[in-house]
Image: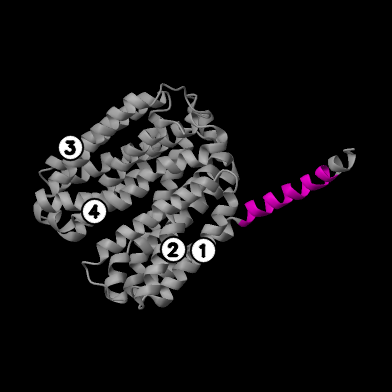
Amino acid sequence: MPRAVYVLAIGIFAMVTSEFAVGGLMPEMASGLGVTISQVGYLITAFAVAMAAGGPLMTVALVRIRPKPALTLLFAIFLAGNVLAAVAPSYSIMMVARLVTGVASQAFFGVAISVAVQLSRPEIRGRALAVVLNGLMLGTLLGLPLSTLIGGQFGWRAAFWAVGALTVIAALATMAGVPRLGRADGGDGDFRQELTVFRNGRLWLALATSTLIIGATFAAFSYLSPILTQVTGFTSKAVPLLLVAYGAATVVGNFVVGRLADRHTIGVLLSGLVLNTVFLAGFALFAHLSVPAVLAMLGVGLVGVTMNPAMAVRVQRAGNPGPLVNTVHASFITLGVIIGSSVGGLVIDRFGLRAPLWLGVGLAVLGTVSLLPELARTRARSSAQSPAQEHAEAATP
């Protein structure tokens, strides 16, 4: 595995830590900026919307730039956004900072994944993507509690200064550890040619599946804390430990999926969706029982966001490994986050805290249905190859 792939994971870890920081510092930020908790919540939404909408536009602007300079430029923009957040004198300036960092973060994801593909042999691309995306898993496992701890001890602004320092470290490591590369396939600088790949219906179906997988997972993940305290009955002090366990499950699942993603892409996605449906349904049915609830939560961690390497391999095969395709894919993943969290909040108001879990079940079932055309295509291809293989075997003396 090329060492540069591990370096790219550091950059993604910095991006994800910044994304999650607001969630752990909401009371402190509300007090410091003189706004309500719900207004601080809008900063999270703004980051996600900037990622989904602005990330592809930023990637388009970088189409003519080679990957390493593009990564360096994105680090610079992301650093500027975090410094602006750290010194923000008002809520409106903080909102601008979140929009800037969200756009840079999404574009960085797309370019970094494209670079990982360029650096890796075809047979290990799934493993390489898993390594890069471990930055995302570790951001969930370590980034959120660390930023919360720093913000609690030294003030919420210190958390953004810490992310800025981590960004500088990641940028220097990238400059030293990532080689100079040409543009990826599909990234020759012709914008119109870049867009032609999006005429492929298989690509749009793959993007839809990714959205549904992430939407199902985040319908549950977004509300784990209130479910575990108000339904399962855990104390608020126990919840951080449970979330760390969830994060550890995502790291394990990401490793396993990365090993299987290249050779068994559709099988991995199908298995993950079916298992996630079972775990989410089990969580919804037994949320009032501590042991089944925790086991179901860990199951969701194992087979939810950990499908990312297989999702990326499928999207790249349907489209290309270029940065624009990868960034658009990341935007569809972010769309899943928005759908899962926002619709989950709406159903809570009407049906209670178990409702997001049932929403996750529904989205996972839809994700499974979205795989059926690809499964039929794979089966038809296998059936067409079998007679030819039998004929070849019969002709062999």
- Image height of 281 relative to 247, above or below: below
Q: Residue at x 17, y 46 (%)?
A: 159
Residue 79 on image: x %, y %? 23, 34
Residue 386 belongs to magenta span: yes
Residue, disc 3? 83
Q: Amino acid at mark 1?
A: Leu
Q: Nearer the viewer, mark 4 or mark 3?
A: 4
Q: Earlier in the sequence, mark 3 or mark 1?
A: 3
Residue 254 visible at all: yes
Calculate the distance from the C-alpha at mark 2 to the C-alpha at mark 1. 8 Å
Residue, disc 2? 299
Q: Residues within 10 Å of mark 2 (few under 14, many from 20)?
A: many
In the rendered structure, find residue 275 and report the number of the disc placed on it.
1
Q: Earlier in the sequence, mark 4 or mark 3?
A: 3
Residue, disc 4? 145
Residue 293 on image: x %, y %? 38, 72
In the rendered structure, find residue 92 and report the number of the disc placed on it.
none
Q: Residues within 10 Å of mark 4 (few under 14, many from 20)?
A: many
Quadrant of the rendering where the C terminus is positioned? top right
Q: Amino acid at mark 2?
A: Gly
Q: Secondary structure at mark 3?
A: helix
Question: Does the CB distance between marks 2 and 1 fall below 8 Å?
Answer: yes
Q: Which residues are magenta?
A: 372-390
Calculate the distance from the C-alpha at mark 3 to the C-alpha at mark 1. 42 Å
